[in-house]
Image: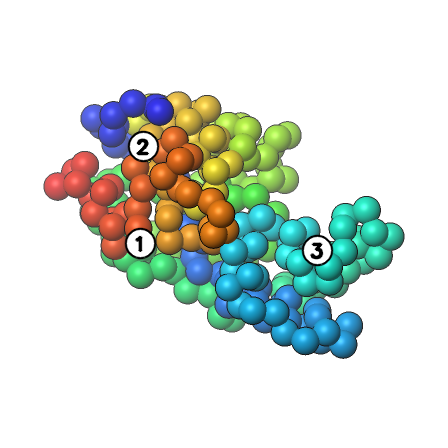
């Protein structure tokens, strides 16, 4: 644990997929299209949703029942990303409560940012399409650092860009690696239990300082610090 809630909250950093934005509908469509291109029937949507936070490689493996060692894997991963990029932002929405939280942060003069393992060429246009007000003051993607989450390097870069002490910042994520990265960075961590989580996983066991059941609960946890 990184300790108690920051006495002087300066910034909140969010994971992207499954924490800030519900991107699963788009990924579900991509997986189903990829399967259709190989004459395969659709998968149950809940199986795809639970895999979103594991990234494109995991979704390709799920879609086609192949491993990364398969000689066709990389070409299929590129096709997956091509399909996704073609409809980027078309069926993505912020989780309920998130936009209210961002407004509260803005009113309180607290900066916010994003730390994601999604590459910047996909992240930046997606965030632009959301037209958040105010926009994030920091966006860190894996191509901005030498080591992605669960290494703390991305979050430390967020804090540097946000000009805040990690001890005065909160990180919210829907995967164990998010909580591990946040703790290693010395930040207060909140697990987004509403995100893309496998049935076999328990966010309560990740070691986060708090667990939020939905976006409204998350807003309540954070806004309580400056009410």
Q: Quadrant of residue 163?
A: top left
Q: Earlier in the sequence, mark 3 or mark 2?
A: 3
Mark 3 Cα shell of 10 Å, populated few (<14), some (14-19), many (≥20): some
Q: Residue furthest front?
A: 200
Q: Secondary structure at mark 1?
A: loop
On the picture, is 217 further left or further right than 42?
A: left
Mark number displayed over residue 214: 1
Provide residue 209's location: percent of width, then percent of height: 31, 32
Residue 114's place in the image compared with 78, above or below, is above
Q: Which residue is mark 2?
A: 209
Residue plotted at (37% across, 53% down): 194
CB atoms of marks 1 and 2 within 8 Å: no
Quadrant holding the N terminus: top left
Which of the pair 145/181 is nearer the observer? 181
Which of the pair 157/195 is nearer the observer? 195
On the picture, is 192 further left or further right than 145?
A: left
Between the residue at mark 3 and the residue at mark 2, the CA separation in whole angstroms equals: 33 Å
Between the residue at mark 1 and the residue at mark 2, the CA separation in whole angstroms equals: 16 Å
Q: Secondary structure at mark 3?
A: helix
């Amino acid at each position: 644990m990184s300790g108690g809630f920051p006495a002087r909250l300066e910034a909140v950093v969010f994971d992207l997929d499954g924490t800030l934005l519900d991107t699963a509908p788009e990924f579900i469509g991509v997986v189903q299209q990829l399967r259709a291109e190989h004459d395969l029937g659709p998968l149950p949507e809940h199986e795809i949703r639970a895999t979103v936070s594991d990234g494109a490689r995991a979704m390709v493996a799920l879609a086609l029942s192949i491993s990364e060692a398969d000689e066709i894997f990389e070409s299929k991963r590129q096709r997956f990303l091509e399909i996704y990029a073609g409809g980027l932002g078309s069926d993505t929405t912020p989780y309920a409560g998130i936009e209210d939280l961002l407004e509260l942060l803005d009113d309180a003069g607290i900066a916010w940012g994003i730390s994601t393992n999604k590459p910047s060429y996909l992240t930046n246009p997606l965030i632009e399409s959301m037209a958040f007000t105010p926009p994030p003051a920091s966006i860190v993607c894996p191509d901005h650092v030498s080591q992605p989450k669960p290494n703390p390097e991305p979050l430390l870069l967020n804090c540097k860009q946000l000009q805040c002490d990690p001890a005065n910042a909160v990180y919210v994520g829907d995967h164990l690696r998010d909580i591990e990265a946040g703790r290693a960075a010395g930040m207060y961590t909140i697990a987004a239990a509403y995100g893309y989580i496998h049935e076999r996983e328990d966010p309560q066991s990740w070691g986060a300082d708090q667990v939020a059941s939905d976006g409204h609960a998350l807003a309540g946890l954070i806004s309580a610090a400056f009410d």
